[in-house]
Image (tube, helix red, strand yellow):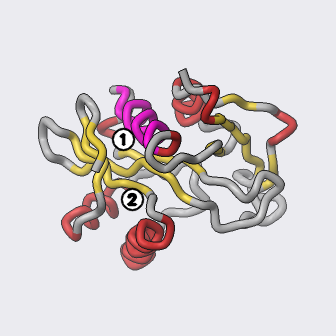
Amino acid sequence: MIETERLILRHWRASDRAPFAALNAAAKVCEFLPKRLGREELDALADRIAGHFEERGFGLYAVERQDTGAFIGFTGLAVPRFEAPFMPAVEIGWRLAHAHWGQGFATEAARAALAHAFGPLDLENIVSFTVPANMRSRAVMEKIGMQHDPADDFDHPLLPPGDPLRRHVLYRINRDEVA
């Protein structure tokens, strides 16, 4: 468990699955994802997230507001499940319910996950990626100190040629770059 000023990053509970499904059903939340996942697919994703913790010792944490105890999404670390020029790598990512956007929660949680990556986990570098148009996620990447080099941008190998979400921007940060 990781605590911040306003959030708790913790392992997932069975009670998180319904709000997780609700946030993944929201059009705004899924705008830059290839498709909206159904409940069965989301439950399988939650199972993979739990397995990632067991296999690697880190993963995507459920994010809970300290003031309300509400599950608002996830933030954390994962090893991407595809090959790309920047692999092997550990990715930092997040997805929050729309009602919690614009309040600094994604940045706060991502900073905590990054501190955990470079502290207790002793990782050397972290990447993050998204489609070029996802300016909100790109802003979080920049706020946590990640850098973008257009030469690193790539076509996501799990998306077919011609898919409007195939092109991705890559951001990076090394442990020695964290202020």
**Label 1: which secondary element:** helix
Mark 1 or mark 2: whose residue is earlier in sequence = 2
Q: Is residue 121 magenta?
A: no
Q: Which mark is residue 25?
A: 2
Residue 3 on image: x %, y %: 26, 39
Q: Is residue 67 above or below residue 53?
A: above
Question: Which residue, as the protein is rendered here, is positioned at the far right?
Answer: 151
* Left or right relative to 33: residue 54: left
Camera-side residue of 99 and 145: 145
The residue that label 1 is drawn on is 98
Q: Amino acid at mark 1?
A: His
Residue 113 on image: x %, y %: 44, 42
* Left or right relative to 18: residue 170: right
Q: Quadrant of residue 5?
A: top left
* Residue extent of the magenta highlight: 104-116
Report crowding for label 1: few under 14, some 14 to 19, many 20 or more residues within 10 A (C-alpha).
some
Residue 54 on image: x %, y %: 42, 72
Q: Quadrant of residue 111?
A: top left
State the count of labels: 2
Q: Is residue 112 magenta?
A: yes
* Left or right relative to 67: residue 173: right
Which residue is at 81% across, 49% downward?
Answer: 154
Report crowding for label 2: few under 14, some 14 to 19, many 20 or more residues within 10 A (C-alpha).
some
Residue 104 seen anywhere in this rendered image of the structure: yes
Q: Quadrant of residue 6?
A: top left
Q: Cα distance, mark 1 to mark 2? A: 11 Å
**Label 2: which secondary element:** helix
Q: Amino acid at mark 2?
A: Ala
Which residue is at 63% across, 29% downward?
Answer: 176
Which residue is at 64% across, 67% downward?
Answer: 81
- By secondary structure, the bulk of the magenta-drawn segment is best described as helix
